[in-house]
Amino acid sequence: MFDWLQNIADYLVFRIFGLAEESHLAEALNFFIYDTVKIFILLFVIIFLMGIINSYFPVEKVRNFLSRNKLYGFEYLMASLFGVVTPFCSCSSIPLFIGFVKGGIPLGVTFSFLVTSPLVNEVAIGLFVGLFGLKVTLIYVVSGIFLGIVSGIILQKMKLEAYLTPWVKEVLLNAEKEQEKYKAEKLKFNQRLPIIWSEVLDILKGVLPYVIIGIAIGGLMHGFIPEGFFEQYMSKDNLFAVPISTVLAVPMYSNASGVLPIVQVLVEKGIPLGTAIAFMMGVVGLSLPEAMLLKKVMSYKLIGIFFGVVTLCIIISGYIFNIIF
Amino acid sequence: MSIRIKILGTGCPKCKITTKLVEEVVKEYNIDAEIIKVEDIMKIMDYNIMSTPAVVLNENIIFKGRVPSKAELVEILIK
């Protein structure tokens, strides 16, 4: 699909810049040009598609849907799926959390949403397709959704309402099933388009620097680190690799855009895919700044339990990935 | 009569852009308006919104969940 792009990259590097075909520099530069352009095309397409979906399913609608309908266990799946299409910004996680609580949605279901939303989003999907291909992307997306569902169900079983901060408990007491009917903006598609378009540009502009830096570092590593370099340190047989890399990743904060291109090169150089994905999920899904934000609605104990359960689920899925691949 | 514009947001970059935009429009068109930034999450939730930033004009939510364009702001605020 992207052969034409490889040809352009080859032409630029070998003809225009006149670099020798076997040199490290040429290889790194070629990789950089090819990857950057390819990833931007994919990001653009996927962010745009998600923007359209999201324009028709705003969070308020989602909340009312979850709050009104009896879903017999499917609410975890629904919350998780909605987490995928909703663009995630850590600054809106609190209003979202409270909005869900207000709508009488069980805490576990809200957690399902909170877990999947940052983990599987339009930027992560675009990067995954570009760097790892469709098959791995599909597995990542499905396991991200599954992770949300499982953590949500576990957290619901633990009955954690007592560990919310006092004012949230008050909101919980006054929760109403019948939310005021959401006044959806009745817009035609061509009226929505400019709004979606400007959001697409905003997101792209936001991730641009991270992706370029990520790919640049990846390109250098690609050109200079020998194949299979990491195999000796982090083989699949090393049972501690997954938990250690996950636990290291949790406090780190970065969006997927910066980490993924580097993770791809690490995998290429011999780190098992499952270990790398567990690391990535830890970086993207959980972070210290997010914990600080959640402090407003949860006690430290609840944040600890929440992070602990999700970390455990990530570690397990890391092992599963390593078995599959 | 002076109008009251509230900007609801917990201090994220998008909220700051929105505030700046509203201030710009108010100044440019000489609108008699009082601009209030609401950053307290508990007060924000009183408006029953789930995505920030939001712009509130005389207690009516006019935008939420996104940064409005300047043209949209001008159109609503000038009335």
Image: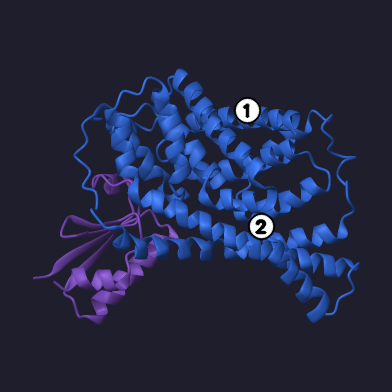
Q: Nearer the viewer, residue A108 or A11?
A: A11
Across and down, in percent, residue A213 comes to 68, 63
Q: Which quadrant of the structure image shows residue A234? A: top right
Say which chain tag 2 marks.
Answer: A
Residue A285, placed above or below residue B13: above
Q: Chain A's colour?
A: blue
Q: Residue at x 39, y 27 (%)?
A: A75
- The kind of residue on which mark 2 rests is Met
Q: Nearer the viewer, residue A173 or A88?
A: A88
Q: Is residue B9 left or right of residue A144?
A: left
Badge nearest the viewer, 1 or 2: 2
Say which chain tag 1 marks.
Answer: A
Across and down, in percent, residue A74 comes to 41, 25
Disc 2 element: loop
Which numbered dot is residue A312?
1
Q: Residue at x 27, y 75 (%)?
A: B25
- The kind of residue on which mark 1 rests is Leu
Which numbered dot is residue A1?
2
3D distance between C-alphas at marks 1 and 2? 38 Å
Badge 2, how many Cα within 10 Å: few under 14, some, many 20+? few
The tag earlier along the polypeptide, 1 or 2, is: 2
Q: Chain B's colour?
A: purple
Disc 1 element: helix
Across and down, in percent, residue B6 comes to 24, 60
Badge 1, how many Cα within 10 Å: few under 14, some, many 20+? some
